[in-house]
């Protein structure tokens, strides 16, 4: 089953064709709304996510499969919040987990519908007016960080499959199980980082080289404007 979480998933959908700079602007606006954990805002963002999933045409079965591990993480956070907060712990824990879950799904949709190269070019475009910043290097590091994160998730899954094939899941000592995962993961990460450094050096990477950026499509700003209008109206009504 193909992974979707923090991987680019090619599709011919409107969200995939939407300009990545507009996606980043929309993501920033949505992030500001998620700073408030009111149920009304969370319901609005849940409806937006449902619409984005329909427009992006991502396979929901694969998405829900990838979200299982994140659901376990959110469950732990919920238990900590519920047990350590004496007043309204259950409610606060549920709202915070709901909000974090929405953030995770927004991030998955963004990375699944945006190529790493487009993410790099978008950040270079945003940082271009600031001449004192190395825009090309920052954009490259951000895109590589997302790429390394997705590769790390893949490597963890491969290690778990290899451990189960060798009956490693029957080991009861949690520290030994962690060691069997962390050590191969660190080794693989260092090897990948070295390979990436050699690849950039072999291709003559330089910060001074010009980058040809696509023109900004003004029509792609319409969904961002619609987002802003909806949030302003919703803010005035709530």
Image: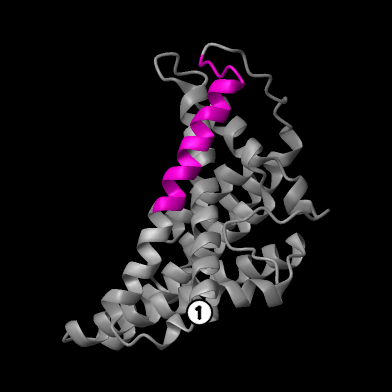
Q: Quadrant of residue 171?
A: bottom left
Task: Name which residue lies at 42% across and 44% down.
Answer: 190
Magenta stretch, overall SS: helix
In front: 166, or 48?
166
The answer to whether residue 43 is visible is: no
Residue under pointer 1: 166
Question: What residue is shown at x 73% (from left), y 45% (from top)?
Answer: 18
- As drawn, the residue found furthest toward the right would be 12
Q: Position of residue 228 (x, y in %)?
A: 57, 50
Q: Where is residue 26 drawn, in percent x and y?
A: 57, 48
Report the magenta residues as a range: 187-207
Q: Quadrant of the N terminus?
A: bottom right
Q: Does residue 82 appear left or right of residue 145 in this picture?
A: left
Seen from the viewer's position, the closer of residues 181 and 105 is 181
Disc 1 element: loop
Q: Is residue 61 above or below residue 217?
A: below
- Pointer 1: residues within 10 angstroms few (<14), some, or many (20+)? few
- Mark count: 1
Q: Where, quadrant-wise, is the C terminus in this rendering?
A: bottom left
* Residue in the foreground of this view, choosing between 62 and 228: 62
Q: Is residue 36 magenta?
A: no
Horizontal and vertical percent position of residue 193: 46, 40
Evaluate whether residue 48 shows in this view: yes
Q: How is the image coloured?
A: one colour
Q: Quadrant of residue 81?
A: bottom left
Most extreme residue toward the front is 166
Residue 195 belongs to the span the image colors magenta? yes
Which image quadrant is residue 64 in?
Answer: bottom right
Please state the horizontal and vertical placement of residue 22, each as a whole percent of the image: 63, 41
Question: Left or right of 168: which side holds 231?
Answer: right
44 to the left or right of 98: right
């Amino acid at each position: 089953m193909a992974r979707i979480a923090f991987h680019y998933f090619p599709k011919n959908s409107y969200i995939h064709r939407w300009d990545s700079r507009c996606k980043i602007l929309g993501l920033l606006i949505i992030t500001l709304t998620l700073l408030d954990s009111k149920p009304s805002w969370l319901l609005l963002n849940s409806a937006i996510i449902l619409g984005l999933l329909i427009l992006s045409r991502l396979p929901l079965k694969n998405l829900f499969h990838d979200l299982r591990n994140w659901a376990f993480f959110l469950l732990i956070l919920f238990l900590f919040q519920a047990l350590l907060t004496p007043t309204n712990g259950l409610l606060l824990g549920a709202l915070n987990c709901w909000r974090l879950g929405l953030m995770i799904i927004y991030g998955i949709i963004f990375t699944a519908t945006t190529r790493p190269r487009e993410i790099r070019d978008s950040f270079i475009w945003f940082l271009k007016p600031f001449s004192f910043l190395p825009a090309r290097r920052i954009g490259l590091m951000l895109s590589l960080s997302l790429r390394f994160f997705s590769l790390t998730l893949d490597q963890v899954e491969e290690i778990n499959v290899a451990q189960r094939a060798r009956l490693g899941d029957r080991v009861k000592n949690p520290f030994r199980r962690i060691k069997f995962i962390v050590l191969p993961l660190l080794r693989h990460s260092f090897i990948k980082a070295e390979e990436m450094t050699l690849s950039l050096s072999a291709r003559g990477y330089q910060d001074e080289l010009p980058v040809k950026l696509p023109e900004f499509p003004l029509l792609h700003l319409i969904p961002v404007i619609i987002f802003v209008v909806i949030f302003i109206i919703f803010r005035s009504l709530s």
